[in-house]
Image (tube, helix red, strand yellow):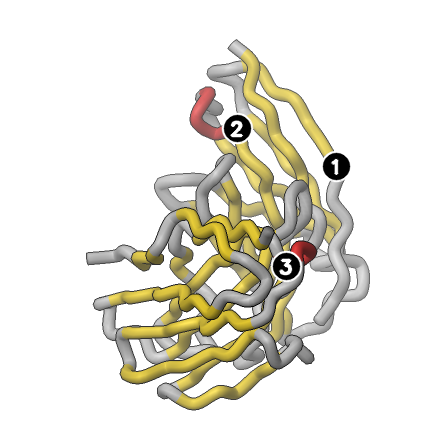
Amino acid sequence: DTEVTQTPKHLVMGMTNKKSLKCEQHMGHRAMYWYKQKAKKPPELMFVYSYEKLSINESVPSRFSPECPNSSLLNLHLHALQPEDSALYLCASSLETVNTEAFFGQGTRLTVV
Amino acid sequence: DAKTTQPPSMDCAEGRAANLPCNHSTISGNEYVYWYRQIHSQGPQYIIHGLKNNETNEMASLIITEDRKSSTLILPHATLRDTAVYYCIVKKKGAQKLVFGQGTRLTINP
């Protein structure tokens, strides 16, 4: 199994809603990542988890709250988002953070209305 | 990590070799060159990486110049499914971040 699975594939939420994005991998990878990608732009790193601990936060606003409940799961909790937060959110994993053969999921396309 | 420069777009005929250049003139000795691609509406996909020797796998070949200041990704027989944005990334071994530049939008034409 070399897949990173993200759910949901699409999400529309209001600015007062609370929602969560989910990412799962069963490759035994110990590093997991969240990226944000706006249209026609490259992916931008948001968070890095290593061995279930947050190791990098790229100055992401607190309305985005990551969580790594176990080595296979990564969540991104969303609260009070703005329309400009609409984007494709990508999850990735790699064996360890030092190994950059990263496997990406297909992303969740988020629209904030 | 060293900055990379890639042409914003390229075209290639189906069945021909696609050669994608990347300039990384400030690369240091412990930085690797990685290539990923992103097909429309999908997540990025790892292609290949190298330090100073040329590398080949089932997807592509990576040619790194002797001074390591530039590299070329070669797709030997491009197909329509190779149409994608190709990202050249320079990264220190052991660094946690994988940082994407603007990439090259490669279009394979029938």
- The three-letter amino acid code for the residue at tag 3 is Asp
What residue is at 58 percent from the left and 54 percent from the top?
A112
Q: On the same chain: label 3 and label 2?
A: no
Find the distance from the CA under tag 2 to the CA under tag 1: 14 Å
Residue type marked 1: Pro
Task: Characterize the local packing of mark 2: few (<14), some (14-19) or many (20 or more) Cα atoms within 10 angstroms.
Answer: many
Residue on which the image places disc 2: B83
- Residue A42 image position (x, y, % from top left): 64, 51
- Image coordinates of residue A95 in percent, x first then y, are 35, 73
Foreground: A63 or A106?
A: A63
Please give the name of the residue rendered at 70% of the width and 58% of the height, measured from the top-left corner.
Answer: B68
* Label of residue A102 in the image: none
Figure quadrant of residue B100: bottom right
Residue most extreme to the top: B110
Label 3–label 1 contact, CB within 8 A: no
Residue that mark 3 sits on: A85
- Residue furthest out toward the right: B25
Disc on the earlier residue, 2 or 1 = 1
Residue B8 disc label: 1
